[in-house]
Image (cartoon, rainbow, N blue to C red):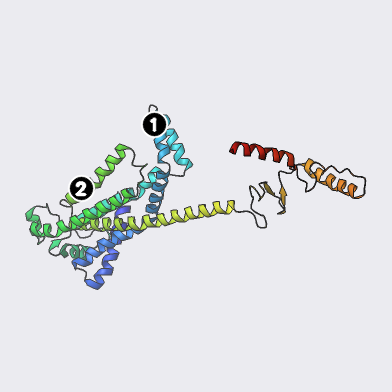
Amino acid sequence: MFDFILYPVSAILWFWHQVFGAVLGPDNGFAWVLSVFFLVFSLRVVLLKPAISQIRSGRKMQKFAPHIQKLREKYKNDRQRMAQEMQKLQSEHGVNPLGGCLPVLLQVPVFLSLFWVLRGFTPQAQSNYIFDSGGVQSFLQADLFGAKLGNWITQPEAELAAFDTSRTTMMAVGIPLMIVASLATYFSMRMSQKRQTDASMSNPQTQMMAKFMLYIAPVGTLISGWFLPMAIVLYFMANNIWTLGQTHFLTNKIDREQEREREKEIAEKKEVQRPKPGQKPAQTQNGGGTAVKVDSDGDESDSDETPQEKSGGGSGKSSGGGKAGGGGSSRPPKGGGGGNKNPQKNRPGKQAASAKKSNKKRR
């Protein structure tokens, strides 16, 4: 039924065993360990693009997390309307909530396929999908420091003895592998949660679930290793170590992309605020307190000068010309060009009277 998955997984494992078996020997335990490791790496490379999409989708979700919180508060009594509004908001921002689950969902059938392939390595088996009888016997004879790759810790002692190993040997090799796998799981999840914004973690339920998963996932890895074949434990360890390195690398990559986008937006805003080439910057006031307006040709004009004053300046010049001709009035023109609007008169009598008053006050 699931042969379309089992055959490709076993083919990848067979290929890497041929590569490392040619160097280390087909029955060498390290050749099989490296084959399992590179099976994981091959599958994770294929899932690299969905993983990048997962991180980008998570960053977009963080940006409008406050909007989602407002929708929850606004439609807390109408769940159907809340779901519609949240779906509308996600479509507007181009976010697919299921995109973050895709890499994890794709790994589930791979894990089950690998588990099923490893279970097929039995002494009675003549073949195991891509592997022939020679490949089956090679896997059964391979060990890692005395621990058989196809056996598990809680297996009955008699069965372990039939494969020329013991529970003590299986525990001595398996427990350190499980601890490394658990630590890699913890640090990768901790690194992911540190990237979460305060807005996305403002929900108490979300925060509690994140803390719960931070500890329950490593503990689950540690406990499940007692009931799984040693090769599956190696798969867990390689997969979690890859996840730790991938999380560090991809998050830094996305951070650099967002930093470049912010710098680009700032540069575009600065370009908008700059004047056009050949145009003088707008000034609020000139040296005399008069506003200056910049024309499109770059010429300055006095914005406070009214048309009457302009015409008055012209009439002042003409009246001045009339005076020069001998027919003009001696009275200075109002608003004439260069004339003082409020001339101060010299009154010596008034100044003398004010001086006498100040002398009397001093006495």
Query: Which residue occupies the foreground of this view, 80 or 43?
Result: 80
Residue 265, image x, y percentages: 51, 52
- SS class, disc 1: helix
Residue tagged 1: 73
> Which residue lies most toward the front here?
363
Picture quadrant where residue 32 is located? bottom left
**Amino acid type assigned to the residue bearing label 2 in the image:** Gly
- Residue at the (27%, 58%) spot, across then down: 241
Q: Is residue 343 left or right of residue 359?
A: right
Residue at (44, 34) in percent of width and height: 85
- Between marks 2 and 1, how big is the CA–CA gap? 35 Å
Closest to the observer, 160 or 80? 80
Read off the residue under disc 2: 220
- Judging depth in this view, the residue of 275 and 331 nearest the camera is 331
Q: Position of residue 66 (x, y in %)?
A: 41, 39
Q: In the drawing, does residue 51 fall left or right of residue 348? A: left
